[in-house]
Amino acid sequence: MRTTNDLTPHAATAAAILPLVGGAANVTSVAHCMTRLRLGLRDRTLVREDALRSLPAVLGVVADDDSFQIVLGPGTVTRVTPEFEALVTGTAGAPVTGTAGAPVTGTADALAARGAEWKAARQQRNATPLKLLLRRIANIFVPLIPALIGCGVIAGLGGLLVNLGWLPSLTPALAAIASGFMALIAVFVGHNTAKEFGGTPVLGGAVAAIVVYAGVAKVTAFGMTLAPGQGGVLGALAAALLGTYVEKWCRRWVPEALDVLVTPTLTVLLTGLVTLYVLMYTAGELSTAIGTGANWLLDHTGVFAGLVLGGLFLPLVMLGLHQALIPLHTTLIQQQGYTVLLPVLAMAGAGQVGAALAVYVRLRHDQSLRTTIRSALPAGLLGVGEPLIYGVSLPLGRPFVTACAGGAAGGAFVGFFSMLGDKIGSTAIGPSGWALFPLLKGTGGLALTAAVYAGGLLTGYVVGFAATYFFGLARTVRGTVSGVCDSSKEGQDTDPGGNPPP
């Protein structure tokens, strides 16, 4: 029998997590996004959440109606997931023994528990049909993010070489590598859509492939000749969703003996005709409207639009709904080569970092909380905000609001320059914070684009810090969290540093 000491760090993390979520028998599905291990669980009551949070590799826990999500951070999650999946499926060898580790004590753990209580209270109110649909759409696009990031970085590198006039013989190859996935992304979207909604994935990919097939240029719909790729990912998503319902309808009445022949044929034929003569045109018009609307919004109301978008993005991240924006980003990237929305939304992470730094300064006697902030801050600087959200700002309450204020200020800064004609965007989605610099592209050249984005980050840091420092901590919270007052002192005043009077 092996122990956790015999395993690699990532295998040991997976082995430590499994018993805390109820064991392999309690796990119905395993997946991951950029930062989170997403588990389907039969019985949530079997989860030992406090012990789970105490694991060194676990940055936070998020429970929604579709999955139980364990925040591990970028890079780590992609290595832990296969190890965890192997344990669940029984392919990892002999059983592993070991403990989850001693629970963390102190106020940082108390804040994590308070955050968990808040999320549990919100869960019932968030289980609306619209939000559930948005989560399903997110599940379609999240697996595509690694390819989007890789191709985006290569596209950015190729663009830089073109601007500098370096390696002209290599840049066409880089362009082909970066564009290949984007040219066929509709197929992957169709595959994932059918899988998510209970259809046959390959049939979803087949009907979505119609959207990007060059031969559609010979088809006329609504008096107009179609163009390959018209409708983009939105058309592919609609086609695959329709195909899934057609497939299910066929399986209800087609005899079993003919199912293997008739169902796929009718699914592709009927869905394909509707895609060509309705969906591609309709989705194309919608995609154009999205691009036009996003540009108009930032060009004419840039400060206000940045204020709203930057200020509201953290609540979307908190609710796990931010991934539903991926279709909009992908549509803009397909149309314009970059998404103008992502740099604005990234300012929310800057506000979060500023707020966390202010908490670190104000609560200087709370070593456990300061340790939590130190461990989560590097991820926050790279745009991974969940550890700071669920470990610091959300449980404290006010710092979450002041972090949103910092994000709003940073978004307004970027929006202001967009109104001046210096529009900035990202050639891919996924990274944020400092990690977004290699993906930046804009109308004013690389140096100006990077300067505007850096100015937005700095504005978010400063406003988030200042708002939290002066308004982000109630007096009773300062004292209680710092461990320098008890219930008998909650009514006493504290000085600006959070200390009670002598």
Image: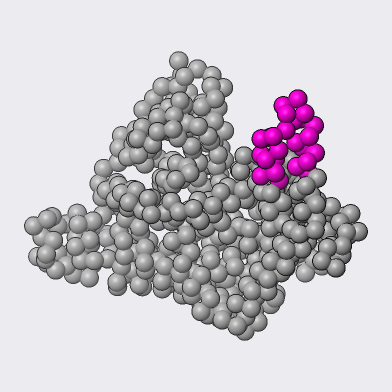
Image location of residue 159, percent across then percent down: 76, 64
Q: Residue furthest right?
A: 218
Image location of residue 5, percent across then percent down: 44, 25
Residue 27 in sight: yes
* Image vertical order of residue 79 relative to residue 207, above or below: above
Image location of residue 30, percent across then percent down: 53, 36
Residue in the image at 62% along x and 50% along y: 141
Q: Quadrant of the C terminus?
A: bottom left
Residue 20 relative to residue 151: left or right: left
Q: Is residue 215 magenta?
A: no
Q: Is residue 259 magenta?
A: yes
Compare residues 8 and 398 and report the one nearer the observer: 398
The kind of secondary structure the magenta stretch mainly shows is: helix
Image location of residue 184, percent across then percent down: 77, 51
Residue 54 relative to residue 310: left or right: left
Count the numbered circles shown: 0
Residue in the image at 56% along x and 81% along y: 301
Q: Say which quarter of the image contains residue 395.
A: bottom left
Q: How was this image coloured?
A: one colour
Compare residues 365 and 26 and report the one nearer the observer: 26
Q: Say which quarter of the image contains residue 47.
A: top left
Q: Say which quarter of the image contains residue 327.
A: bottom right
Residue 5 in sight: no
Residue in the image at 16% along x and 67% along y: 494
Q: Residue furthest top?
A: 1
What residue range appears in magenta?
A: 243-268
Residue in the image at 77% along x and 63% along y: 281
Q: Quadrant of the N terminus?
A: top left
Compare residues 232 and 224 and report the one nearer the observer: 224
